[in-house]
Image (tube, helix red, strand yellow):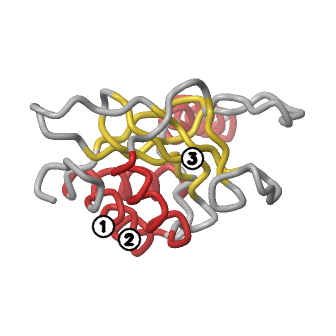
Amino acid sequence: MDWWVLLLILGAVAMAVGPVMLMQPNSAQRYQEHLRAKALQLGLRVKVQTLPAQATDAEAQRAMPVYYLPLKPDQMPGDWLLVRAPYAHEAHLRDYWVWQGKGRSTAVELSWLEQILPQLPVSVCALGASPMGVGCYWTEQGGQATLLALRDLLAAYPGVQGA
């Protein structure tokens, strides 16, 4: 009889503790949390958005983090987006970058883009400017070293605070 009471108590404890343990973040979620907290310390804003689909996409895009650096309050931000294409083409900017939508960069922005596009890691899927600031769609691969490099590249954008 004592055996069944012990088994019943262990079962009750497992049923109470089990769901709590399932709510704990896994290692990938802890990595994201740490990386995004570091981004906030660096002055970046992080927002999860869906990358607009390209005509060549066979599957729907999934949501991914966008790391934004805010623009100066007195600057009217551009409104454009460049998406990395899976193939090189002479019509693309720097072979792999496709304009998405109707917005295009100014001549000053284009000069900045020509300098930084070759430096972007493969984990950056898109780059753009919007009312949120200048930002990149990033898969968060490469850790803090890549985050610091991206922050520096975004900080070189004409009109970014502190640039």
**Horizontal side, residue 128 vs residue 57: left or right:** left
**Horizontal side, residue 161 vs residue 103: left or right:** left
- Secondary structure of residue under mark 2: helix
Find disc 1 in the rendering and name its residue.
152
- Whether pointer 2 and pointer 1 mark residues with C-beta atoms closer than 8 Å, the reply is yes
Q: Is residue 135 above or below residue 86?
A: above
Which of the two labelled residues, at mark 2 and mark 3, occupies the earlier sequence position? Answer: 3
Looking at the rendered structure, the number of numbered marks drawn on it comes to: 3
Q: Amino acid at mark 2?
A: Ala
Residue reaching furthest to the right? 58
Q: Quadrant of the C terminus?
A: bottom left
Distance from Cα at disc 1 to Cα at disc 3? 16 Å
Find disc 3 in the rendering and name its residue.
126
Label 1 CA crowd tier, 10 Å (few <14, some 14–19, many 20+): few
Q: Amino acid at mark 1?
A: Asp
Q: Is residue 85 above or below residue 143?
A: above
- Determine the residue positioned at 83% across, 35% down: 57
Q: Nearer the viewer, residue 160 or 112?
A: 112
- Determine the residue positioned at 36% across, 57% down: 34
